Amino acid sequence: MKFRSKRDLEERLAFIRLYVKRLKENPDEVFKQQVRLVNSFLASAKSFPLSREEYLRMKGELRRR
């Protein structure tokens, strides 16, 4: 995995450390609920009416070729 800068890498590592800490501190039930939430987001995203490219173009973050 490549990072644009050292800061990006450091931020990613800090996030991973924080997430692991939370995993160790919370009961399994907390993360079971989180898994259900993330899965519902993914299911919703699959039925989104626009493709990724159409959405980014609409937001002005993707240029037409």
Image: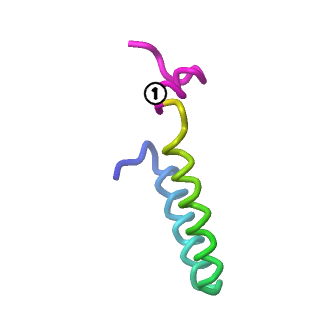
Which is more toward the observer, 1 or 52?
Answer: 52
The type of residue carrying mark 1 is Glu
Q: Is residue 53 left or right of residue 58?
A: left
Q: Position of residue 26 (x, y in %)?
A: 65, 84
Relative height, residue 61 to residue 23 (above, below): above
For the point 61% across and 69% down, the residue is: 34
Residue under label 1, please give it.
Answer: 53
Q: Quadrant of the C terminus?
A: top left
Q: Position of residue 13 (x, y in %)?
A: 50, 64
For the point 52% across and 53% down, the residue is: 42
Residue 15, quarter of the rendered image: bottom right
State which region is magenta. 51-65
Which is more toward the observer, 63 or 34?
Answer: 34
Which is more toward the observer, 18 or 26?
Answer: 26
Give the crowd class for mark 1: few <14, some 14-19, many >=20 residues within 10 Å: few
Asked which secondary structure carries label 1, the reply is helix
For the point 65% across and 78% down, the residue is: 30
Is 61 magenta? The answer is yes
Is 47 magenta? The answer is no
